[in-house]
Image (tube, helix red, strand yellow):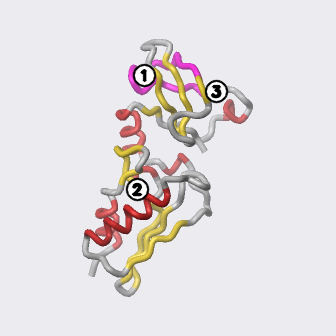
Amino acid sequence: MITAQEITDVLEAVKDPEIPVISIRELGVLRDVAVHNGEVEVTITPTYSGCPAMDVMKFDVEKALRGAGIERFSVKQVLSPAWTTDWISESGKQKLRDYGIAPPPHSADIRALKGGTPVTACPQCGSTDTKLISQFGSTPCKALYKCNHCLEPFDLFKCH
C-alpha cells in the first residue's frame, strides 16, 4: 500500500507552471496528502483567489499520480485558510532567488500596507539599493523592481 510520503515524493516533480524551478510543495500550494482505504486525496490551495495556474497545477498533479500507477485519487482545491507566502519553504525561496526572482520576506512588511515599499534585495547582486517600478510584474503575484547597483530588472514575489 502506498503511503502519503511516497505520494508527496511523486508530487515533488509537479512544478509551478509560471515558475518552473519550484515545486508545488516548496511553494506551499500542496497542502495535504492523505491515503484512505487505498484512495489518495491531494489538497492544493491557490496562491491567490482566481490564480490562472491552478487548473494546470491540478492537471499536473493528476498526471503525476496516473504516471505513478495510482488510479483511485481525488484532487481538491481549498481556499481556506488562504495561502500565504510564509508557506514557501526555505529551499523554495532559494530556488526563486537563483531563478532571478526576489523571494518575499517571512511576513507582510508594514511599509507595504502603508503605501511604502519594503527593503528588497536584488537576486542578482544582493544589493538592497532597489526601486519598485510597477506593482505588477510578469504575473499577478509578482511586482517589477530594478536594482540601482547592477541595473538589472527583477521580479519580487509579492508578500500576502
Please report the bounds of the magenta region as a residue range: 117-132
Would you say the residues marked 1 and 3 are in contact, meaning their CB atoms lie under 8 Å apart? no
Q: Which amino acid does label 2 sit on?
A: Arg
Q: Which residue lies furthest to the right in this view?
A: 114
Q: Name the residue under label 1.
A: 126
Residue 132 placement: quadrant: top right
Would you say the residues marked 1 and 2 are in contact, meaning their CB atoms lie under 8 Å apart? no
Q: Which amino acid does label 3 sit on?
A: Thr
Is 113 placed above or below 31 here? above
- Element on which disc 3 rests: loop
Q: Residue furthest bottom?
A: 37
What is the spatial separation of the Cα atoms under label 1 and label 2, in whole angstroms?
Answer: 26 Å
Q: Name the residue under label 2.
A: 25
Residue 41 image point, x, y percent? 43, 75
Mark 1 or mark 3, earlier in chain: 3
Q: Which residue is drawn at 72% across and 29% down?
A: 115
Q: Does the magenta stretch include residue 126?
A: yes
What is the spatial separation of the Cα atoms under label 1 and label 3, in whole angstroms?
Answer: 17 Å
- Element on which disc 1 rests: loop
Q: Residue at x 57, y 20 (%)?
A: 131
Q: Which mark is residue 117?
A: 3
Is 78 placed above or below 48 here? below
